[in-house]
Amino acid sequence: MTTEAHTESTEATTAAPTGVLLTDVAAVKVKALIEQEGRDDLRLRIAVQPGGCSGLRYQLFFDERSLDGDIVADFNGVEVVVDRMSSPYLAGATIDFADRIDAQGFTIDNPNAQNSCACGDSFH
């Protein structure tokens, strides 16, 4: 099932079917990274596992696969994919990109997590 959700401002305000919000800043960064890869078949896949600094360990990676039960949302031309097992843990989570002294890289603000953490090393 593929459904589209679009954001209009720098902060996403409407929940996508994936439960994840991707800010416009993060969408621009993801789009640039995909262009650097030189491929047009990649999507940003977000998955969670128990553990990590926030009670949840996040996996953010580019993926061309479509798995049974995937939930897909479109944010300004960037497809975000969440598997059906991770979706409940990501409901209301916001993915942003920070480039500041105190934080650099992709950040995940997840109300389901015990604490928050920056995941800037996800795209090396």
Image (cartoon, rainbow, N blue to C red):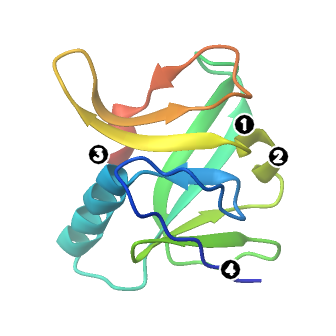
Q: Which numbered tag is attached to residue 124?
A: 3
Q: Which numbered tag is attached to residue 88?
A: 2
Q: Which numbered tag is attached to residue 98?
A: none
Counting residues from the N terminus, which is met first, the one under dot 3 or under dot 1?
1
Q: Nearer the viewer, residue 77 or 47?
A: 77
How would you rate the neighbour count of disc 3 (Cα within 10 Å): few for under 14, some for 14-19, many for 20 or more?
A: few
Q: Secondary structure at mark 1?
A: strand
Counting residues from the N terminus, which is met first, the one under dot 4 or under dot 3?
4
The residues tagged by marks 2 and 3 sit, at their Cα atoms, a distance apart of: 27 Å
Residue 46 on image: x %, y %: 59, 53
Residue type at mark 1 is Gln
Counting residues from the N terminus, which is met first, the one under dot 2 or under dot 4?
4
Left or right: 106 in relation to 7? left
Q: Look at 22% across and 74% down and name the residue there.
A: 35
Residue 81 on image: x %, y %: 61, 66
Marks 4 & 3, CB-CB < 8 Å contact: no
How would you rate the neighbour count of disc 4 (Cα within 10 Å): few for under 14, some for 14-19, many for 20 or more?
A: few
Residue holding disc 1:
49
Q: Secondary structure at mark 2?
A: helix
